[in-house]
Image (tube, helix red, strand yellow):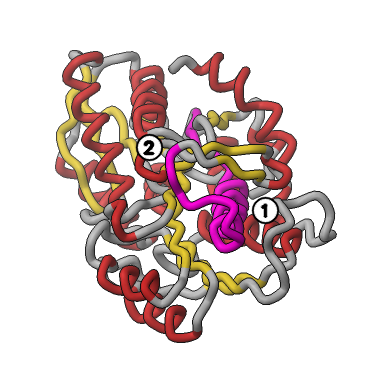
Amino acid sequence: MKLTSVLAAGTAAVLAVGLAACGSGGDGGDGGDGGASGDVTMTMLPKNLGNPYFEASTAGAQEAADELGATVEEVGPDTASPDSQVPFINTAAQQGVSALIVSANDPTAIGDALDEAKSAGTKVVTFDSDTEPQFRDLFVNQASAEGIADKQLELISDQIGGEGEIAILSASANATNQNAWIKLMEEKLASDYPDITLVETAYGDDDDQTSFDKTAALLQSHPDLKGIVSPTTVGIAAAARYVSTSEYKGKVAVTGLGTPNQMREYVEDGTVEAFALWNPNDLGYLATEAAAALVAGDITGAEGDTFDAGRLGEYTVGADGVVVLGEPFVFDKSNIDDFDF
């Protein structure tokens, strides 16, 4: 996937909604399919609280809920450990919420709890990070795994001149989405980037200080390191913060997946040349619209189902109950000030 194709396909859509994460629409206008009503309740369960990426996705969920006349409440653990979401799932099921919208910390650890919630009549939509398919009704994917892997490798290759040692700074070792992207990056490095060597994959557990410390350890352990790829918004910001005040600034490239507001200062000071992401506000918005369509009975999650997603237009459910938001978008010094999330 080339940068030009991403820009051509995604610029208009992303620019149109880039400011949306600052607040919700809430005007009860043209959102959704009209199936939701005031008694539709949804629980938004991110991997952990206090993460700017999930704060933006929850803002999008709130925007959609306002338009649909539904209620959404965000709950979640402070840390993104495999089973830390289970108590929140159990509580939501006991409360009889209409839908759970979950970014899974582990593909199986929360499965039993989700099964019980589904048995109680709660619709389950995963977003951002999936469970095993049998534990949910739909997965709203931010982009295809192949597209995300391709874009990150394209970025790091461009920034290190197509050769040298790189490392990956991931979230938790159990994160479904991170592991899928890393596996694809490993495969594509072997086949398409013979002069780039992946020397280590480290895990910062989506914790700022841990990710900061792991960055320091990577740079100390690999003196010839030319780049760090961090496919997590917490990790890339922590890595950039470390590099920005170190001897490695301008020598070691940092890229991956981040939000404009987190990364703006590092792009402006030259620590980071470019990075990628989708709009997390849109992701939360789409997941909420999908959950509302499930609750209303407009879709079942079967392949080929279609539903109206408000300002995002119509979406079609793909194989294994997957709905794809779109392609990654690249942020750099030329466009980062056009976005606020």
Q: Which of the two residues, 171 or 290, is positioned nearer the viewer here?
A: 290
| Identity of the residue drawn at 47% across and 15% down | 2
**Residue 117 disc label:** none
Disc count in the image? 2
> What segment is highlighted magenta in the picture?
274-303
Using the image, determine if residue 141 lies above or below residue 112: above
| Identity of the residue drawn at 30% across and 14% down | 162
Is residue 330 visible in the rendered image? The answer is yes
Is disc 2 placed on a helix, strand or loop? helix
Residue 89: x %, y % from top left = 39, 75
Choose top left, top right, bottom left or bottom right for residue 77.
bottom left
Q: Nearer the viewer, mark 2 or mark 1?
A: 2
Using the image, determine if residue 275 lies above or below residue 308: above
Q: Amino acid at mark 2?
A: Ala
Is disc 1 placed on a helix, strand or loop? helix
The reply, left or right, for residue 160 in relation to residue 191 is right
Is residue 241 visible in the rendered image? The answer is no
- The disc, 2 or 1, on the residue closer to the chain's N-terminal end is 1
Q: CA distance from mark 2 to mark 1?
A: 29 Å
**Label 1, residues with CA under 10 Å away: few <14, some 14-19, many ≥20:** many
Residue 37: x %, y % from top left = 71, 69
> Badge 2 is on which residue?
319
> Badge 1 is on which residue?
21
| Identity of the residue drawn at 46% across and 71% down | 122
Q: Which of the two residues, 53 or 67, is positioned nearer the viewer here?
A: 67
